[in-house]
Amino acid sequence: MVVLGEPLTCLNLYEEISDVRLHSESHTSVEFEKKLDCPLGVTQDLMKYLDDRILTRILVADAGVAFPDTLAFVFRSRMPYYSERNNISVVTVDDKEDGKEATKKELDVFISSLSTKEIKAVVVKAGEPASRSVTYHSAKDVENIYSAVCQGLAVLEDGESIIVEAFCETLKPLPVPHLDYEEQAVGIKSKALSCTIRAVVCCTPDGNQLVSDIVCGIGHADRTLHCNNTLPLSLESFLIQWGLQNKSKIEKIRSMIKEKAEDILGNWMKHENCLNKERGGLLAETGIIGVNFVLTQQEAGSYEAVAVSVNNSRKIIENTQMCELQNPAELGSSVRPLVATMVNRSQRFLLRGKKILLIGGGERIRKEFVWRAAEEYNVKIILIDPDPNHSAVKRVYKFIQCDIEDHSHDDENTKKIVHLLRTQGLDVDGCMTVDENYVPLTALVCEALRMLGNTPEASRMAKKKSLSQNALLASSTCSSFLPKPHLYAVKIHEIVRPEDVKGSSNLIRYPAILKPEYGAYSFGIHLVKDEKECLKYFNSIQKTLQNTDEKAFGIGYGKEMHLAEYSLGTKHGVEVVMFRGKILAAFISDCGPTRFPLFFETSSCMPSCLPLDKQRQMVMATKQCVDAVGLTDGVYSVEFKMAPTGPKLIEINERVTGAHYRNWIRTVFETDILFLNFLIACGIQPRVWPLEPRCQLIGVMCTTTAHAKALSRPGIATLEILAEAHEKGEIILFPMESELKENEPYENLLCQVAVKGKSVNEAKKNLLAVCRKYGIDNQQYPVERFLSPFVELSWQ
């Protein structure tokens, strides 16, 4: 994945928004915030919940994360605390004097339970967290513990609490020979040290959780550690100082802390959703929290991270920014996911209620994701389609049936659409298509309605594959710093009639690729070894074109074909986001080897396994190819072959991908390219903030010829069984057909089956096991070979 353009500086943007938010919070109330169209974020009301030590402790417990045994005294509690954990006890005190006796009894029981667990010390935390009123006591010194609780109780205000908890000792440092020698030589014994670990957890744009930073602080064990009395350093530096040199152990500890912290924020967000419903909508969402851990060592030698507190955003930024200032290359990294989420929420509000004219609704279930997305983002789709019984009729804001299938009359179709909108009094904010067949018509409608979009000429050149290649050959680049666009082109020979095949070997090197000029999804594409075979398949495909209504063949635009010189190399897709001629983001995927002589996709992988310099080279090629054609605004799917000499253009699809890649990009990078397309169509410049890849995805396609029988075995492998496996999380299923159809005149795609992994190797292993389980891997469809190009690069 490569992001181009001029992204905002995360740190600066966060500071600006924080200043506004903190200022507004000090002068406003929740009632004011309820009247806002777009929520401020963490409000004063919500902050009180985050600062509630008892509530956060219970939520930590509910998340399944280790925590100290806890006894809490709350003065005149404002809310009920529910905990089924026997190591969390909450006592309500309504009268400070009368409650002292009950306090003593509860303390005796609590201390007694700690002694059975051989816990030697307790911590008393009194008042609000900001007061830092923390004292440490021997578990045997019950009188002093009781005294500390009574002193704290005397100054509590309504709703405030005192926490008495078991002391968690940081794991002891391993012996370090040179330090031991220094101590002995100098005659000074090192003071006992302790360490606090703070994980910064952000809510991502898709509502997931992501640890953006882990910062440690080392200090003497006889005092409470916080950002004001420790210097920030990385988790790795802390563990190395503590004597852990094993890289795999360090990575395991980091993963454990990351998982626990993300689980805590996930559980908090569930609680927050309940609060919003109960309170009639707080119009607020937590974007970032800090979780403080103590790393302890278990009897078996394993390590455990114990959560000792949760902090709100105001208290965690200071510490992490200190660490970032020491490491300028990391500046802003801790709040980058937060800023991405804040910007995403703002853009969702900008898009809410916009009316988007959608030309063509696509076929079958392949466009189902569009209607779900429109509902998710509260976009009003006005769909124009020739089919009066289209599956989306009841899913969209407004459906208009209009005969627009004859693309030779797109000028007249444009007038009909504009007339229908005007007569029905429909004002639209944007216009787009997700159907390859309506790309040129959409450009004409955008021009007629003066909507943001590509010119009709650019759309015509992108639609016809030979024109795209010719545009590269004809393009001239003024800058000496850019490659010549013709380097991305492949040699082609247009074939309109059978006579055009004769003599083609003098112009094109065989074997070559015979393909329709206007097709999609690799329909009708065939590898031919000589003129004789080329003529044979040209006649066969022309016959198929005459006898089918399959729109993927692009028959509405003509039956022309062309020969393209075959380029050796690996195939790749680039999903590119453009606004006003500028690439905002590009997402690269790898494709596995094809099953010759056809060219349907067999397997795919994201993120790309290409070296970073080749990925950047491919993004540069994408930019120059779309510039040569004249495309400026939208989300496109551009296909390349990475030949030994560099990228070679296969084709440009001037619409958001209709395959699984939209889902993949959202899963891996938390960026929804369809959402970005909605924004662009409405003339809103997207702020694209792709996160670092969260996982590795690898998948295989299932086709009619290779899997119709395999996926028809009741109780073993059917589309319904695969759907159940998807619901269980075993696989990620992207259906393309709602039912199996055998004996079709051409191969068709049934579905895609994919798996997640932490690495390329893990994902490959998991996918191969799934394919063997459900019969997807067979003699006709050797999955292991199709996965062979996906190789993990150890140096990246």
Image (cartoon, helix red, strand yellow):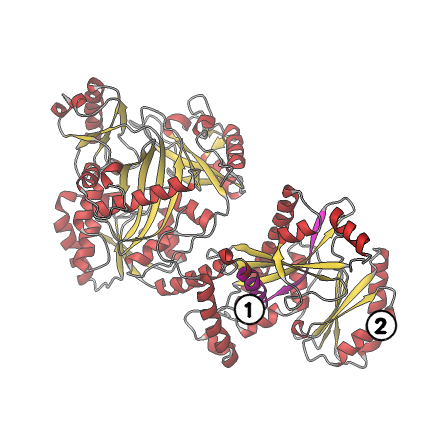
Label 1: which residue? 278
Badge 1 crowding class, 10 Å Cα cut-off, few under 14, some 14 to 19, many 20 or more, is: few
Secondary structure type for disc 2: helix
Q: Residue at x 12, y 50 (%)?
A: 412
Question: Are the residues at dot 2 and dot 1 in contact (C-beta closer than 8 Å)?
Answer: no
- Relative image position of residue 773 (x, y in whole percent): 53, 29
Q: Measured along the vertical axis of the image, is residue 156 above or below residue 111?
A: below
Q: Residues within 10 Å of mark 2 (few under 14, many from 20)?
A: some
- Is residue 560 found left or right of 76 in the rendered image? left
In-front residue for pair 24/16: 16
| Residue type for callout 1 | Glu
Q: Which residues are magenta?
A: 303-325
Q: Is residue 674 left or right of residue 144?
A: left
Instruction: Judge whether 566 appears above or below 433 on screen.
Output: above
- Res 20 seen here: yes
- Spatial distance from mark 2 to mark 1, Cα to Cα? 42 Å
Disc ID at residue 144: 2
